[in-house]
Amino acid sequence: MEPATDHRYTATMIAPTLITPRLTLTGHTGDDLDDLAAMWADPGVYGMIGGKPQSREEVWIRLLRSVGQWTLFGYGNWVLRDTATGRFIGSAGLLEARRAIDPPIDAPETGWALAAHAHGQGYAKEALDAVLAWSDAQRVPRTMCIIDPDNSASIRLAAKIGYRAIGRATYHDRPVDLYERMAGAGANG
């Protein structure tokens, strides 16, 4: 399968730090493994994202993928921490997942996952507003995301940040809805 976008960068890139009123978004490091592993083992997190817990090994590979995305594509995921306390909030950003999904995802994917203690407090929107403002500034013309059709909170959030539903697909034997966002749509436009 060919790359989903033409947004390759010739220089190796490190995740820039983004600051919002409550959050600091930084690139992943090995020190984030414990927080990420705890998040991906929590049914309140994985229930609507894949439906099964991820082992520490799977989370380590996910962390490495997050680091590698920046090197290969010039975009990737950030770790979200409360600026005042340093408490882990979650992860959000862009990824090149190369999913075996039909119809194919042909743009960078926006993804987010928050620790259960951070749900319902507006952190996801705050982080994604920063991520998408950064993406728009990089001239990424279009992004996509997939959301479990039963995940009403993420569906509402996607609409608030400029995503619109474009169809349904099956991924890992589960239905997912496909969404797209054109640069500048939603709160960042």
Image: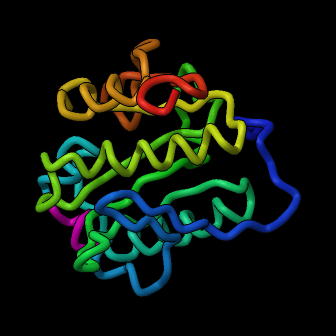
At x 60% / y 66%, what residue is drawn? 16
Q: Which residues are magenta?
A: 37-42
Compared across the picture, whether 158 is left or right of 40 comes to right
**In the rendered image of this protein, does residue 146 appear above or below residue 64?**
above
Residue at screen point 58% across, 29% down: 105
Q: How is the image coloured?
A: rainbow
Tell me the residue at 55%/71% (across/down): 64
Where is residue 111 drawn, in percent x and y? 43, 45
The quarter of the picture where residue 57 lies is bottom left
Residue 113: give x, y in percent of width and height.
31, 52
Residue closer to the observer: 103 or 94: 94
Query: Is 159 located above or below residue 134 in the figure?
Result: above
Q: In this view of the protein, which residue sits in the foreground, 180 or 172?
A: 180
In the foreground, 18 or 87: 18
Residue farthest right in this picture: 10
The residue lying furthest to the bottom in this view is 31
Q: Quadrant of the N terminus?
A: top right
Majority SS type along the magenta span: helix
Q: Is residue 164 above or below residue 94?
A: above
The location of residue 139, given as percent across then percent down, is 72, 37
Count of numbered tags: 0
162 drawn magenta: no
Question: Position of 189 compared to 114: left or right?
Answer: right
Q: Quadrant of residue 104?
A: top right
Along the horizontal axis of the image, is 176 left or right of 163? left
Q: Position of residue 156 (x, y in %)?
A: 24, 26
